[in-house]
Image (cartoon, coloured by chain):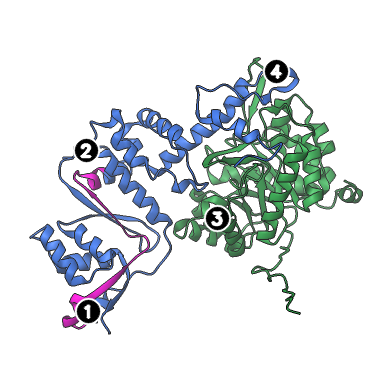
Chain colours: A blue, B green
Amino acid sequence: MRPEAGLSFAASFAPALLDPARHTPEIVTGPNGKAANRRYDVYRNNVTVSLIEALAAVYPAVQRITGPEFFRAMARFHVRNHPPASPLLFEYGRDFPEFIEAYEHAQDMPWLADVARIERAWLDAYHARDAAPLAPTRLSAIAPERLADAVFIPHPAMRIVRSPFAAVTIFAANRGDAPAERIDASAPEDALITRPELDVAVRHLPAGGAVFASCLAAGRPLGEAAVSALDASPEFDIASNIAGLIAAGAFISLAAGDT
Amino acid sequence: MNTVISPTRPPAMPLRFPTPIGGVAGTSFKPQHLSDILEAGPRRGFFEVHAENYMGDGGPPHRALEAIRRDHPLSLHGVCMSIGGPRPLDKAHLARFRALVARYQPALVSEHLAWSTHETSFFNDLLPLPYTDATLACVCDHIDQVQEAIRRPLLLENPSTYVAFRESTMRETEFIRAIAERTGCGLLLDVNNVFVSATNQGTSALDYLANFPLAHVQEIHLAGHAEQADDEGDLLLIDSHDGPVADAVWKLYEIVIRRRGAVPTLIEWDSRIPDWPVLQAEAAAAQAILDRHQSSGVAGERHAA
């Protein structure tokens, strides 16, 4: 869309905000003929720094792992190439995990992107719509012969993140101030993220649990979900998994055929 | 005749004129202060929040705001509407803003004379605009849309600026006065912004205040600023909101209150946020000035401007 007459100032002012190679826009000046370079730089700095800080607020564990200097350099690169499209900063940085995955200087931390994915899911759970979780007694009220047809509605805050690395342990170790301990990063871990009330909880799902929970969240009946989970992992235990998901607040309701 | 005279669609939200809260001092609400605030119980004053921080669907932010709102008047301060930009307003963002106003029924609702979005990029800063007939018409149109959506007057805040535009044909005070007269909006006078901009533009803060339409002012902001240097090595002030209010700004504030009478006044502190008692002490200092002038304010001043 072409700006209307007299309204081209934003198109002239904006491009250099995130591009240090561009000059100060000609349309601005200092007072009484003074220069405007350092003056315009105030806006450049506000934009860049505030967006880096927005990413740091979404990804505190990633920043703790990399250290602030590494994080800010990585975030600056991302901010300049992918500025936010929404004024809601808690929505910013959805593509940051993919960016980390491809970031040349983070290649020796292959698990870092998955830690970021858990942090992104954590914040989505934090802001998700409030809903009362399913009461555990609802499941026991269903006749045993109907259990296989039971269909669950996921809680708005429920998220699953799967990782070929120990992303849950690394996430948990870096969201607080506890001193770092050695972690075997090579053990695959799947995360369940829920927020039944005010507090977001991140759990490590047992083998087959992520397949099972994903199937249920997609609306597939309990019996089918259990078969898929057993296919994925022969040691999968349906009773402890369903009880664990319900206790974590992963669902809000349950329907079993015509009951 | 087949002509159907259809009445205008009735507004889904009634027009609302909230009870004035009078000359009280408030503070920014920061979640880290929530337990201190609730523990101390209801207090005189009000709390201001950035609207965008409460535009999520649910979770702790809304619970905290509900708890604060239960006992205190609220001021909803929008930061990202991009009212000063040439682009049409973001309809989805306007709907979210309207929903917050409807849900929390704030005593004060404000936004900035600035822009923050261009094309598809959101820059997260309050960017400046030239003051011309064309930008004036555009800003007024945007304010009309906001006021129509929220069904009440908006308070518009004067910016802090670091540059001037070669194409500007009006002074900022003239521009803001014209907006208030054309749209019926109220004004949020940020006294720190007046001081910062006057220093940066080489003009006089007192002249600015003398030309500012004080009669339209319904809220005041006070905040701290930081010092840098411009290209010539002269002082350049940064609207940083990261410290106490400067002495010079307190002096200007008292001048404004003496002329305008007591109006709700906010201590804004958004970065390097101190413990709650420090923030509360700044608000108490503003309240002391307000209390000295509760009955003053030249009657003629309110209507002459």
Range drawn in magenta: A142-170
Q: Residue furthest left?
A: A234
Using the rendered image of the protein, determine whether residue A185 is visible from the camera's viewpoint: yes
A150 is within the stretch colored magenta: yes
| Callout 3 amino acid | Ala
Tag 4 and tag 1, C-beta contact below 8 Å: no
Q: From the viewer's perspective, is A216 left or right of B161?
A: left
Q: Label 3 lies in what chain?
A: B
Q: Secondary structure at mark 1?
A: helix
Is disc 1 in the same subunit as disc 3?
Answer: no
Sooner in the amino-acid sequence: mark 4 or mark 1: 4
Alpha carbons under labels 1 and 3: distance apart = 43 Å
| Callout 4 amino acid | Lys
**A144 w.r.t. A80: above or below:** below
The residue sitting at 74% across, 59% down in the picture is: B20
Tag 2 and tag 4, C-beta contact below 8 Å: no
The residue carrying pointer 4 sits among few (fewer than 14), some (14 to 19) or many (20 or more) residues within 10 Å by Cα, namely some
A52 is within the stretch colored magenta: no
Alpha carbons under labels 3 and 2: distance apart = 46 Å
In the image, which is nearer the foreground, mark 3 or mark 2?
3
Residue A18 in percent (x, y) is at 50, 30
Q: Label 4 lies in what chain?
A: A
**A140 w.r.t. B294: above or below:** below
Which residue is the site of mark 2? A181
Which residue is the site of mark 3? B92
The image quadrant of residue A224 is: bottom left
Label disc, if present, on residue B299 of the rendered structure:
none
Alpha carbons under labels 3 and 4: distance apart = 40 Å
The residue sitting at 69% across, 59% down in the picture is: B148
In the image, which is nearer the foreground, mark 3 or mark 4?
3
